[in-house]
Amino acid sequence: MKKILKIIKINLKGGLANPSPPLGPSLGAIGVNIINFCKKFNEITSSKLNKLLFVNIIIYEDKTFEINIKKSTVKYKVLKILNLKKGSNQPNKNKIGSITEKDLNSIALYKMSDLNCFKLKSAISMIKGTLKSIGINVIKKK
């Protein structure tokens, strides 16, 4: 079993990795072959060209690496649904939007494998916390 040297969490566009900042300096400082990483990443993500991906790069002591592509964050998904650029600067006072319970359930199902829970109810609870922190309400349909 290889020993992990570092885990880098970074957002990259699918199929468009290149050695320029922020990727190049992050990997180069550790001694990872940046060109090999870019080739492998671009090959893996060629079907998701130009789509923002959330990536964990696990770097081992021997300078080899593993690429784990995560699903979009809850915040990213919600802001995209509502066509907003960012969350509220005062989430407790200034609500900037609302999503339906149906949207909440679909986000929970989508994100379930990345969350640290096993039940849909738990995932929904976690996501409600994120919604509260960015100033989004959940509308209950009657």
Image (cartoon, rainbow, N blue to C red):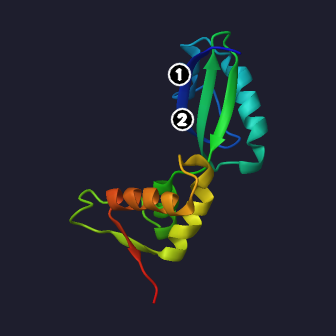
Measured in 3D between alpha carbons, the distance from the residue under mark 2 to the one under mark 1, in whole angstroms, is 10 Å
Q: Which image quadrant for residue 75?
A: bottom left
Q: What numbered label is drawn on residue 26?
A: 1
How far across and down, in percent of the image, does residue 82 sit?
46, 69
Q: Amino acid at mark 1?
A: Ser
Towards the viewer: 139 or 48: 139
- From the viewer's perspective, is 127 left or right of 44? left
Seen in the picture, residue 52 relative to 29 is either above or below; the reply is below
Towards the viewer: 51 or 110: 110
Nearest to N terminus: mark 2 or mark 1: 2
How far across and down, in percent of the image, does residue 90 sit?
23, 59
Q: Residue at x 71, y 41 (%)?
A: 15
Q: Is residue 86 visible?
A: no
Q: Which class describes the residues within 10 Å of circle 1: few (<14), some (14-19), or many (20+)? A: some
Residue found farthest to the left: 93
- From the viewer's perspective, is 137 left or right of 46? left
Query: From the image, which quarter does the C terminus lie in?
Result: bottom left
- From the viewer's perspective, is 96 left or right of 48? left
**Residue bearing the label numbered 2:** 10
Query: From the image, which quarter does the N terminus lie in?
Result: top right
Q: Residue at x 33, y 69 (%)?
A: 96
Seen in the picture, residue 30 relative to 72 is either above or below; the reply is above
Q: Which image quadrant for residue 68?
A: top right
Q: Residue at x 34, y 61 (%)?
A: 132
Q: Amino acid at mark 2?
A: Ile
How far across and down, in percent of the image, does residue 63 sit?
66, 13
Q: Residue at x 62, y 20 (%)?
A: 59
Q: What numbered label is drawn on residue 6?
A: none
Q: Which class describes the residues within 10 Å of circle 2: few (<14), some (14-19), or many (20+)? A: some
How far across and down, in percent of the image, does residue 14 sit?
67, 43
Please report contact status of discs 2 and 1: CB closer than 8 Å, yes or no: yes
Seen in the picture, residue 56 relative to 32 is either above or below; the reply is below
